[in-house]
Image (cartoon, rainbow, N blue to C red):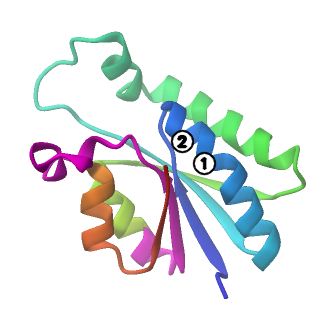
Amino acid sequence: MFKTVLFPIDQSRESREAVETVAGVVKTYRSRLIILSVVETPEEPPTSAADREMTSVKAIAKLLAEAKALFSSQGIEAEIVEREGKPAFTICDVADELNAELIIMGCRGLGLTEEGAAESVTNRVINLSPCPVLIVP
């Protein structure tokens, strides 16, 4: 049913919490797993340490390698993809490009308010995705 599953990750707690759900879906459907991280090119220099981490190529490479090893320890072979761009648009572009049949992602809950909805990566992915999106709260 879900031949290819795309799992966009960042360094958030929500991404880590979604791992169990991703593993369950991939094992159940014997899916191809693609782990994606998007390096966002900021319009202004990052001010916080967390923002600097998400624009560091070394940090992203380490994050992807750790995620791949985590799934490997569960007997799941994963492919990793790193892209640069705006996260929501890049996630949807990669899903389309790789013919993903499902995107699974964690949610920070920022889009639950009217003000946050327009800025939420999760909300944008839901609205732009070429395939179903499973959100893990």
Q: Residues within 10 Å of mark 2 (few under 14, many from 20)?
A: many
**Residue displayed at 67% across by 58% down:** 22
29 is within the stretch colored magenta: no
Element carrying mark 1: helix
Whether residue 76 is situated above or below residue 84 in the rendered picture? below
Q: Residues within 10 Å of mark 1 (few under 14, many from 20)?
A: many
> Could you tell whether 27 is left or right of 12 in the image?
right
Label 1, label 2: how many angstroms apart (C-alpha)?
5 Å
| CB-based contact (under 8 Å), mark 1 and mark 2 | yes
Identify residue for label 2.
15
Tell me which segment is drawn in magenta.
95-119
Whether residue 116 appears in magenta in the rendering, the answer is yes
Give the percent coordinates (x, y) of residue 71. 78, 48
Residue 68 lies, in percent from the top left, at 72, 44
In the rendered structure, the answer to whether residue 58 lies left or right of residue 28 reads: left
Q: Quick check: 114 above or below 31? A: above
Q: Nearer the viewer, residue 20 or 66?
A: 20
User: For the point 60% across and 48% down, which residue is it?
Assistant: 18
The quarter of the picture where the N terminus appears is: bottom right
Mark carried by residue 18: 1
Whether residue 68 appears in this view of the structure is yes
Percent of width and height locating residue 61: 56, 33
> Observer-nearest residue: 108 or 41?
108
Residue at point 90%, 55% (across, down): 75
User: In the rendered image of this protein, does residue 66 appear above or below residue 94?
Assistant: above
Q: Is residue 137 above or below residue 70?
A: below
Tag 2: residue type? Ser
Mark 2 secondary-structure assignment: helix
Left or right of 124? Residue 36 is right
Q: Give, as a three-letter code, the residue at label 1.
A: Ala
